[in-house]
Amino acid sequence: MDLEQLKSLLPPVFNQICQEIRINDAVIEWVDIIFEQIGTASKCPPHAHTWFEFNYILSGQMVTHFGDELVQVGEGGFFLIPPGTIHSHSYTRGNPHEEICLRWRIRPASTEKADVQGESFFTRLQRLQEWNSGSYRDNGNLHGLLEQFFQEALTGQSELALQLLLIHLLEYLSLLQMTMQGQVTSSTAVKDPLVRKVEVYLEDFQSSRLSVGELAASLHMSYGHLSRQYKKLTGQTIIHRMNQIRLEKAKELMKLPGLRIAEIAEQAGFADLCYFSRAFKKHYGASPQNYRRQTAANEST
């Protein structure tokens, strides 16, 4: 579905979910969720908000000013504006932009109702107050979250389910903030939900043949669209990732001395022993037989 259709069908849904939701010790109030319309305006004068504002550029480009800093933001880019940050916008003539804009406020839940274990969720979200101004390129995670949000909004998911998707987006931004400050490594970032679902399916798949049609159908997508999205988000194909998972499983099975190589290949999901041997050697630098011998020798020393 194209952007014009989304802009026509989704605003009523956005209006319905603009309300408060409590998660652990935090209350999130959705102030606005809109596809921003600028009409014929060429600029927006300096101003500040009492809320957080997240802007994701879906097409075109715009320029945002944070004080004396000028930032150009194009398709697939985003910026986040914490409360109280003075900023202004200017728009490129002949190249209008389209964006999705999320606005929210947060406050701590009352202490007598909050049941907090570990780090405070409110603290994690409040950390976004320290977000460094500027334009950021999306690595695909935010686009995947927004696309899932749009699709589930179109299919009539509950207000709670849609709000939780947006909470997931805020949590991702919070972890990204921690990564930029060196507080966590990038490996702890939230995995895109589509990627997570695909990998759960692949890891659970026991047959020697992957039913790509079944995988796509379980996600309510065509296989072509699923393949394109997965490669965009991960940089690799579903088949490549499937083989990685099967080879990892085969390596673990190598530790069982009672299993023959042919049995390992079959249990790992490879129907062809020759293909398995070639793939294993390419991935681990040794044939299955040599890898098993080397591992056994290393463990005996």
Image: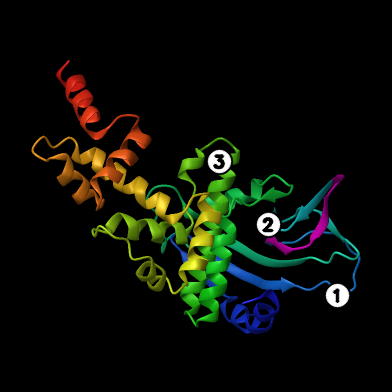
- Residue 123 visible here: no
Q: Earlier in the sequence, mark 1 or mark 2?
A: 1
Main secondary structure of the magenta stretch:
strand
Which quarter of the rendered picture does the C terminus lie within?
top left
Near-viewer residue (233 or 268)? 268
Determine whether, in the image, residue 44 is placed left or right of residue 31. right
Amino acid residing under circle 3: Thr
Chain part drawn in magenta: 53-69
Q: Is residue 263 above or below residue 116?
A: above
Q: Which mark is residue 39?
A: 1
* Cα distance in 3D space between marks 1 and 2: 21 Å
Amino acid residing under circle 2: Gly
Q: Where is residue 113 drawn, in percent x and y?
A: 41, 64
* Cα distance in 3D space between marks 3 and 1: 37 Å
Residue pointed to by mark 3: 179
Q: Where is residue 80 drawn, in percent x and y?
A: 69, 54
Q: Residue at x 40, y 61 (%)?
A: 197
Q: Badge 3, how many Cα within 10 Å: few under 14, some, many 20+?
A: some
* SS state under label 3: helix
